[in-house]
Image (cartoon, rainbow, N blue to C red):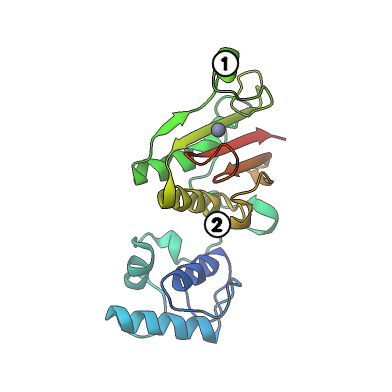
Amino acid sequence: MALQVNSRGSDVTRLQQALQSKGFDPQGVDGAFGRNTRTAVMNFQRAQGLTVDGIVGGDTAEKLFGSRDRKYFDGVSDFEGGGTVTSPGNVTNGGGWGGTERVANAAKSIAQQMGIPVTSQKRNLADTQRVGSSTSSDHYTGNTNAFAVDFGVSGSRGTELARRIADQYGIPRSNIGTFNGHNVTINGERYRLQLLWQVSGHYDHVHLGIKKL
Ligand SMILES: [Zn+2]
C-alpha cells in the first residue's frame, strides 16, 4: 500500500514534514493526504525526475527519506493518539530497570546509524555526585524503575538526533527543548519518556529518560 489521496496517519504526517523540510509545502501538517499534499508530492517528484503520479511508493520514499523501507509508506500508523505505541516497530520494552532498559534500544539504534556514541547510562551514587547530577535522575541506579541514556553530540546533528528519536517514540517535537515528559504505552505497559536537548545542561548531549509508571 502506497501513500496517496485519502491516506491518513503517522506516515502521512512524516511525509508532510519531509516535504515541508525540502521546500515543497503541503499547506499544513495534519496527517491527512489531500489535494495540497498531492500537489506537493507531484512537485517533488517532478523536481527529482521521478514519475509524476502523486503517489508515494518506494522510489519517492527513497528520495524523501533516504530509505525504501516500507514502514515509511505502508500507511500503517507507527503510533496512535495519546502516545500509545500500538504497532511498536522497533520500540519495545523489557530487560532490566522495570522494563525500561529495552525501551532505549530504538534510540540507540538511531544514534548508532548516525555514528553518535552513547556517553552515559545508569550511574551509581559516586558517579551521580561526580557529574553533578541528582538522585532523582533516571540515570541514578537508586531509581530501579528508570533508565536513561545520553548521546554525545552537539549542534545540528544533536537536533537531528533529537527529532528522529521524538518521531520514533511519538514524542511531540514541541517537547524537545523543554523538560516536559510524554507518556506512552508500549505492549500494555506505561512509561514516561523525557527527551532533553538544548535545555539547561543538555547542549553537548541528547538525553532520553524512561520511567515505568
Ligand atoms: Zn542524561
For mark 2, give the secondary structure: loop
User: Residue at 54% of width from left, 45% of height from top?
Assistant: 197
According to the picture, the residue beneath numbered tag 1 turns out to be: 124
Q: Amino acid at mark 1?
A: Asn
- Horizontal side of residue 104 vs 69, given as left or right: right
The N terminus appears in which quarter of the rendering? bottom left
- Horizontal side of residue 36 vs 186, given as left or right: left
Residue 169 pos. (x, y %): 56, 49
The answer to which quarter of the image holds residue 139 is top right
Image: 37 above or below 106? below
User: Residue at 35% of width from left, 80% of height from top?
Assistant: 45
Query: Which residue is situated farthest in the left direction here?
Result: 49
How many dots with numbers?
2
Residue 122 pos. (x, y %): 54, 23
Evaluate if marks 2 and 1 touch, with contact meaning CB atoms under 8 Å apart. no
In the image, which is nearer the foreground, mark 2 or mark 1? Answer: 1
According to the picture, the residue beneath numbered tag 2 turns out to be: 78
Q: CA distance from mark 2 to mark 1?
A: 35 Å
User: Residue at 32% of width from left, 81% of height from top?
Assistant: 47
